Image (cartoon, coloured by chain):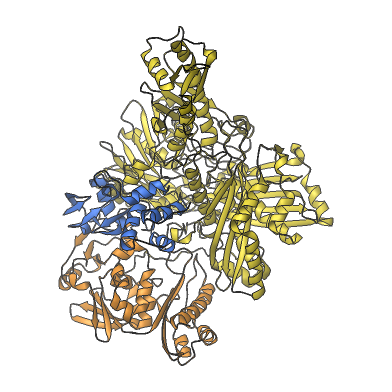
Chain colours: A orange, B blue, C yellow
Amino acid sequence: MIPAAFDYLAPTSVEDALAALAEHGDDAKIIAGGQSLLPVLRMRLNAPEVLIDLGKIDSLRGIRDDGDAIVIGAMTPHSVVGSDPLVAEHAALISKAVEHLADAQIRHRGTFGGALAHADPAGDLGGPAVALGAQFVIQGAGGTRTVGADDFFVDLFETAIGDDEILTEVRIPKHTGWGARHEKFVRIVHQWPIVAVAATVRVDGGTIAEARIGMANMGSTPVRARAVEEALAGQPATEDAVRAAAERADEGTNPPSDLNGDADYRRHLSRVLTRRAVLAAAGA
Amino acid sequence: MTRITLTVDGAQVSDDVEPRMLLVQYLREKLGKTGTVIGCDTSNCGACTVHLNGTSVKSCNVLAVQADGAEVTTIEGLAEDGRLHPVQEAFRECHGLQCGFCTPGMIMQSVDLLKENPNPSEEEIRLGLEGNLCRCTGYHNIVRAVQHAAGQAVTS
Amino acid sequence: MTATVDQVEREIGRDRRRKEDQRLITGRTRWTDNLTLPGMLHLAMVRSPFAHATITSVDTSAAKTAPNVVAVYSGADFGDELGVCINAWPITPDQVAPTHSPMPSDRVAFAGEVVAVVVARSAAEARDAAELVDVEYDVLPAALDLKEAAADTVLAHPDLGTNKSALWVFDSGEAGTGAPVEDAIAKARTDGIVIEREYRQQRLIPAFMEPRSVVVDPTGEQYVMYSATQIPHILRFALAATTGVSESKIRVIAPDVGGGFGGKLQVTPEEWIAWAVGRRLGKPVKYTETRSESLLSAHHGRDQWQKLTLSAEKDGTVTGLKVELLADLGAYVAIVGGGVPVLGAFMFNAIYKFPAYHFSVQTVLTNKTWTDAYRGAGRPEATYAIERLMDELAAEVGVDPIAIREKNWIKHDEFPFTTVAGLEYDSGNYEAATARAKEMIGYDELRAEQMARRASGDKVQLGIGVSTFTEMCGLAPSRVLGTLDYGAGGWEHASVRMLATGKVEVVTGASAHGQGHETAFSQIVADRLGVAFEDVEVLHGDTQVAPKGLDTYGSRSLVVGGEALVKAADKVIEKAKPIAAHLLEASADDLEFANGRFSVRGTDQGMAMAEVALATFAAHNLPDGVEASLDSDATYDPVNFNFPHGTHLCAMEVDTETGELKMRKYVCCDDIGNIINPLIVSGQVHGGLVQGIAQALWEEAVYDDSGTLVSGSFVDYLLPTAADTISFEVDHTTSPSLTNTLGTKGVGEAGTIASTPAVVNAVVDAVRHLGVNDIQMPCTPERVWRAIQDGGSGGATTEAAQPHFDEAEGAGA
């Protein structure tokens, strides 16, 4: 319950944070909202020598409209994202996923960028991020680069963020007018999802024009259900059509087996939840 | 050691703390605010819930140094001028507690919940308290207490 | 005058708000971990990561040199002064039990066992130094699976030569309480019905909200132990018995205790280690466990295999029940330990008139955390088994589950009734409670909806679960405990002290940890002595304040402790009477006592109890030979158990596509005799229900094949939240108990006992038409889904947890 001792730095600019990272290298760990990191430290699963807190960098907080995208600062708390009208209008899938992320206290403190950078494949935001084609803006000493969602998640708890880099913001391409549904399947509500399916759908005259689907806990990273997306394009938004397409939800996935369900069960769930999520998102 | 200065339950305090000290440990060990308790090590139970700058947080999941300059309210600062907060009153009225260990966190979260949603449905109350575990009450009377505090008619 | 007296409102039966709450809702609490004493040192435990291993070396040198470390000890540093953890209930004379050192020096027998303790000036520094203790182990094969352990495939304690601890048997043929069960089964095999099933009672963790904590203060004449315990008196006795300190030099205090549910009915290694360290160093010490440590090392509950054979006539009249249990003790025989299944032995026949009954339990040692009492202790297991079987019998006969119960239960006019297990049930009315429960849930309408959903092949099916129950509570008549070889009696003690100001101090040997004794006991005494509820102060939980007692468990506090209070209060009245008579210049025979007042029959002369108390305190004018005290004690030994009962009904929706369960409604009608405080009773029922429902649906302590507890945190040991549960409908019928003055029956465990089978019966009922007749607990969505797929009971739990708090790289969320 008591972390090992560490030094604490609270830089007020990204540049200072990067300099601290450069100075302390592997000994340092970034803390954003800390809602996953602090349990790790308390249980002494990790013991960094230096903690670099991004909490005092005001530029990392906030949500803005940037033309074809909504830009969410990495240090924006979940509770702010969840109640933001811009996000609700242009990236409804995010709003819906955040609504049931962890619990109220953790949503007050935990941050949008922190959760994504933690890259827990069972996390609530990974599915929506890949579904919406989020762009991750990463800053290092050499400048800023942008990585697409498909390349951002590398493996279990591993992202494209380099050891000397910081995730500063996430750009969510606008999906204005798209229907959205986040189907999170749990045994008890404050669990990580056994499987979650995030679907957003653009319906045009009763036909599914486009569908984007991301899934949590179906592999070591959040995954897109591309086969379903392709199968859905141009299909009527009907139970039968969606059911047929959703049968392909687990194609190319590699779900884990654990206390809450084995891989086969997760595959089954992914198909059922995909059908339900798409139908709901399509308003069918 | 790092010097921190903050306001806790209306009083300004200032201490040198190790950066690793959790806010809950600071409250309990440095300030003697033992009304706030520790129930788990994974941030599931919510027993340590306090208000940090007006919103609920789990004080095991915040470092004391991160509370520098902040305003913290604990269960011990909820009553004003010796008058119980309506949510405290409601927990007693509706028998929303038994052993009382989860109660400080449960009350602090309920206050936060009602601030954000003054007239919640039963489902909204239950979801709003999902980060707080209770082993005694089966939650039934906790939900009643929140409804009572919200001024809703309460059945047994 | 008389008129006003008659208007005094009786306290018993009122929904008084609790006296305890003012401090609990304002954070003015005294949890053990809140205590800070001058110079107090802090302990951190070093625990074995292995389930079974020889300790080859413990190197404490690095830890000893760490900042502010005062001492580091391993088991080898203590001799007999460390004492042992005791088993108070050897269930058979030849029970095999390993010696349980609080900190073994040679061999560890479960993952989590303490091998060394670090003492430092702060808890943080103690933890830091604990990381530096270097323990080397030779890993031994571990006995983990209960059935394999029962076959002695691998030995949990090689020197014992067997894992089989004790075989305890009850046979109605031998006991003369019924016929031989084998005859009944043989007959049923030819011309009746035989139901044979095997049920699993999964391992559970009590998971009280307050982690255990202990403070030892050796600086006064008495050594003081503060502990988050349910049993301060038993703890004091055990410390004296095993550590060589005179009982008179030991004071145990259970301050505010945050829940127990049986989980704090234990004498623990951590308490014994703190005791030894405190005494060795002569300084106050504190140890508070983390939640992970608590889940790992505080005792677990349940963990049985139940092999069951029920025989019946073709019309569903039960002719016999045979129960063969395997019970997992874990690595050591805990304080009650093997006695837990024995507490269930008398309850498998439940509310029914079975003519033949046989029960056996084989207790088995394994290399897992020790097991002991968890809410219900033995009775939930028994109730689960029989109530599941009655549903199976109903299905076999083709009748409604309630009809099969009605055919077999004891009718209300058949009380008192001596059961096939040899207990005498004093009162009850199963017909009335069942009728009320059916009305509350709308039973017939739900059955109609169920038929409609089945007929239409709805993806969401509806099940209605039925569970009746009775239990034996109020542990316990001492002579019965004696015949069962339990190590203590079952009495309870109380004192009533009349203060000069007319206030009343009540001292009870029961030790509350959330039950509301201060309130309920005040109501009882207020009525008995005719004093104001507010004027009664209830003191407990400190062996120097309440020197005599047997503590709180087994739904005993009210029915045993409450009766002791009544008897002590009556003695106060008896002592006051001659004094009042003297002061009123009347004959004691002419006095009557009512509503707190002695009156002289046929006159308007009288005197309040408070006035007598003041006069007694002044002692200026007492009758000759009468002592100047009204204070009275009573020790009450119950004449019988008491037998609450009830009918619980649960409506459950099952999503057949995913196996997801949604509880729609839960109603119960419990008969717990007369009720002292309906508000407190409702709380006990609600909380009990959720714990029982949680066994049915969510909770399971899972070990992997190396003996590591996989569900070792609240991430993986699933306690339900407010959002996972529903509001309940609770009602009562009343058949007063005939064996105590107040007519009360225990209620602490009722909800837990009845709800588990009600829920599982509901789930099975929803999908029985799909070929399912059992689903193993906890009924996870995956198990339900699999059962629907293949008709099995859903298979074993995958023994792996998913990491969420990982040490891997990446910024913290």
How many discs mark residues in the rendered view?
0
The residue most toward the top is C624
Image-quadrant location for residue C464? bottom right
Q: Give the image location of residue C193, x and y in percent.
A: 78, 57
State the residue in front, A168 or A154.
A168
Whether residue C566 sits left or right of residue A86 in the image: it is: right
Image-quadrant location for residue C654? bottom right
Q: Mark yes or no: residue B2 visible.
A: no
Image quadrant for the N terminus of chain C? top left
Q: Residue at x 37, y 70 (%)?
A: A99
Whether residue C92 sits left or right of residue C687 in the image: it is: right
Whether residue A210 sits left or right of residue A242 in the image: it is: left
Q: Give the image location of residue C390, x and y in percent.
A: 69, 55
Compared with A64, C136 (above or below) is above
Whether residue C60 sits left or right of residue C200 in the image: it is: left
Image quadrant for the C terminus of chain C? bottom left
Q: Give the image location of residue C57, x and y in percent.
A: 40, 48
The residue most toward the bottom is A234
Compared with A187, C503 (above or below) is above
Q: Give the image location of residue C282, x and y in percent.
A: 31, 32
Image-quadrant location for residue C496? top left
State the residue in front, C435 or C40.
C435
Compared with C455, B2 (above or below) is above
Q: Mark yes or no: residue C781 visible.
A: yes
Q: Residue at x 55, y 60 (%)?
A: C665
